[in-house]
Image (spheres, rainbow, N blue to C red):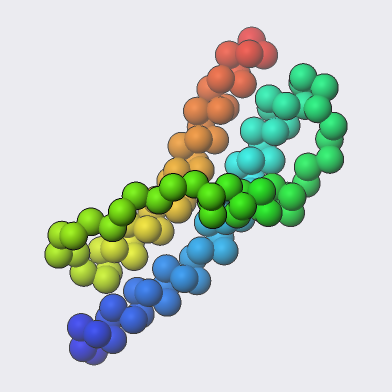
Amino acid sequence: MSNDDDGCLWLVVALLATPFGVMLKGWTLLKMWAWFALPLGAPDLLNLWHGVGLAAVVSMMAPTPPASSDDRGARETAIRAILSMALTPLFILFFGWLVHAAMVS
């Protein structure tokens, strides 16, 4: 397989992983809503699909860092994007869980 084919493969992998990343962000938003907004009296109108939609809208409006000009290959760029897509919401969820645990204890 040539280097160009490898780059296209990793681009496809990153694109296929994107819906899962958006779903994970939506699920994280749903959990944070349940932990922090509902106890304040907010209505329980948020379901997973609302969370996914809101996460997608916020992701579109959030500033993205400029692409670095170093010489990374398509494989490394795709792996970094997938890891960022998965680890960012999981880190936020973990931090929210710690705060929620401190609140209820």
**Residue 49: x and y, percent?**
74, 54
Residue that appears at 84% across and 40% down: 45
Q: Residue furthest top?
A: 105
Q: Residue furthest bottom?
A: 1
In the rendered view of the protein, which quadrant contains the N terminus?
Answer: bottom left
**Residue 69: x and y, percent?**
18, 60
In the rendered view of the protein, which quadrant contains the C terminus?
Answer: top right
Q: Quadrant of residue 75?
A: bottom left
Up the image or down, 96 lies above or below 87; here it is above
Q: Along the line of sight, which residue is nearer the eye, 56 or 90? A: 56
Q: Residue furthest left?
A: 71
Q: Quadrant of residue 34?
A: top right
Residue that appears at 33% across and 61% down: 79
Residue that appears at 64% across and 33% down: 32
Q: Along the line of sight, which residue is nearer the eye, 53 or 24? A: 53
Up the image or down, 53 lies above or below 46; here it is below
Up the image or down, 68 lies above or below 104; here it is below
User: Total of numbered circles in the picture?
Assistant: 0
Q: Is residue 70 left or right of residue 5?
A: left
Residue that appears at 21% across and 69% down: 73
Q: Is residue 79 left or right of residue 19?
A: left
Up the image or down, 60 lies above or below 77; here it is above
